[in-house]
Amino acid sequence: MDQPAPSNDTGRPIPILLLKNQSQPRDSYETHFAQDTVQRYAPTFVPVLSHAFVDSSLERLSHSFQSFASTYSGLIVTSQRAVEALSSVLESLNFSNAETTSTHKSLSFPIYTVGPATSRAIETVRDTNLPKCSVEGKDTGNGEALAAYILARHHTSQQQQQQQQPSADEGSSDAMTERCLPLLFLVGDQRRDVILKTLQDPALSPTQRIQVSELTVYATTTSPSFHSELATALTMPATSAAQAIWIIVFSPAGCEALLRQLGWIEGDRLTATNGARKDNHLEHKGYVGKRDDRRGEHQRVERREEKEAIARKEKLLRASRRERGESSVYVTTIGPTTRDYLWQEFGFVVDASATKPSPEGVRAAIENFEHGKS
């Protein structure tokens, strides 16, 4: 029998613990859940990560804008912290001297980004500092989709620009490739390399590949206060008295700490009531194995018999969690990467996973689960 859908019969809002740093000046998740006429959910932010800019990289980025047009063909910015790093550099340039400000404000190139929240943040920076640049890729949703988007569009736009400024050897594909300048990718020290690998895949022809220069502009560590802040959030009166609590996980960082804080992991494995052992290789619905090559041997389970067996496994894993009085805590992830990480590393099955990394996607995942569609 399926577990009951989470609800609060008391009429109080259902607590949602968002395991992320709250974006400034206003977080899109806070805005979204505050728009309810009847406040069904009450979000609380629990910072998981601590970020610090890499000063030497910010200095390099600042210098790059003096010759950006002859060095790079565009930017890739896929995180809020990278946006903040870029904003910091551009703001400092605005106050340095009028000539430098004029130079970067006259630049015209694409800024590729992923997801609505990061897109909104980069658009704000663009409007003030890079008014002639375009922001592209906001509907792609993840790194793989963004890389495919860039492959489909970037060469075309670059070639169109080159055709407007022909050279003596414009008919040469080799010369055309050489003139396709690399993209500058602003990254953190902990990132997946799916975008880099996809754009520079050896299977692509030389004219299809897009060169990428990575610049690590910030470093990330788990916040030293995460354990205490999570414990505080879980024991707040509104949370501890709730019949249902949703915890939203945004990245693999902090996953182990979360499971330990909830008492769902002991040693290097889940407790008996909370899922399969890490070495149980049965892949459940929509989950994949180790993702060294997503297009390789590890594909989604397609056969009906396997799907039915997997669905039964999911129900057993979730039901066992509930039998020990843990029915109030539900977990959803911002997308498949973190969902798969929890399964691969800890054998933990989440209750729901957003199909889009956005406030609307998270809400839909929760409500689909509540209505029995997950």
Image: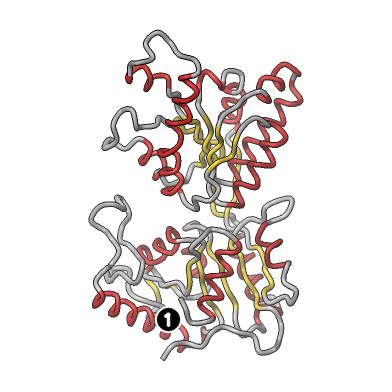
Looking at the image, which is closer to me, 1 or 45?
Answer: 1
Q: Image check: 168 left or right of 9?
A: left
The x, y position of residue 92, in whole percent, is 71, 28
Q: Residue at x 52, y 44 (%)?
A: 137
Q: Which colouring convention does the figure follow?
A: secondary structure
Which SS class for mark 1?
Answer: helix
Q: Quadrant of residue 42?
A: bottom right
Residue 35 is situated, as x and y percent measured from the top left of the image, at: 73, 67
In the displayed structure, does residue 121 sit left or right of residue 323?
Answer: right
Crowding at dot 1, Cα within 10 Å, few <14 / some 14-19 / many 20+, comes out as many
Q: Is residue 158 left or right of residue 6?
A: left
Kindly identify which residue carries mark 1: 318
Give the residue displayed 50% in from the left and 25% down from the top. 72
Could you tell me which quadrant the N terminus lies in? bottom left
Q: Is residue 46 above or below residue 123?
A: below
Q: Left or right: 72 with respect to 226? A: left
Q: Quadrant of residue 2?
A: bottom left
**Residue type marked 1:** Arg
Compared to 26, does 96 lie above or below? above
Residue in view at x 60 percent, y 50 percent: 50
The residue furthest bottom is 1
The x, y position of residue 129, in whole percent, is: 70, 31
State which quadrant residue 82 falls in: top right
Residue 60 in picture, x, y percent from top left? 57, 25
The answer to which of 127 and 172 lies nearer the viewer is 172
Number of marks drawn:
1
Between 338 and 222, the one nearer to me in the picture: 338
Position above or below: 167 against 271? above
